Amino acid sequence: MYRRASSASRICSESLTAFSIWSGGGYGRWFGIATATVNAIAALLSIPAYPFWSLAIFAIDVLIVYGLAAYGGDRRITAG
């Protein structure tokens, strides 16, 4: 039987991922991409129940994956 992770462990892993991304670590970047991808798939699977909400979450997940893939972990500051 499928069992959901507890909210405390989920918040802990998301917090570790966020701090890893902020510090420029590669772990957070790849874990964030994997988590957003799984969440995007789950959003697509829930379209019949919540069509507009699922599409909004899917769009946000796509932006998260793009942002982490293109800019995640890059700590360089560029001046114009």
Image: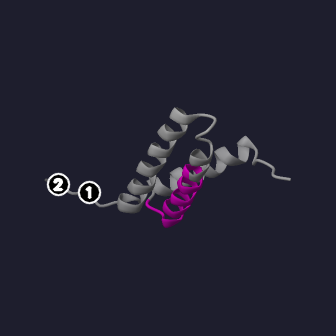
| Magenta stretch, residue numbers | 24-40
Where residue 47 appears, as percent x and y from the top left, is 58, 41
**In the rendered structure, which amino acid carries the disc numbered 1?**
Ile
Q: Is residue 62 left or right of residue 53?
A: left
Residue ID for mark 1: 77
Q: Which residue is mark 2?
A: 79
Rounded to the nearest whole Å, what is the CA distance between mark 1 and mark 2? Answer: 7 Å
The image's mark for residue 42 is none
Residue 62 in the image: x percent, y percent? Answer: 44, 51
36 inside magenta stretch = yes
Q: Quadrant of residue 79?
A: bottom left
Name which residue lies at 81% across and 52% down.
Answer: 2
How many numbered marks are there? 2
* Amino acid under disc 2: Ala
SS class, disc 2: loop
Do labels 1 and 2 touch, CB within 8 Å?
yes
Residue 59: tell me if it is visible: yes
Q: Is residue 59 left or right of residue 46?
A: left
Vertical position of residue 60 compared to residue 37: above or below: above
Q: Quick check: is 59 in the magenta stretch?
A: no
In x, y percent, where is residue 37? 54, 56
Q: Label 1's element? A: loop
Is residue 74 shown left or right of residue 5?
Answer: left
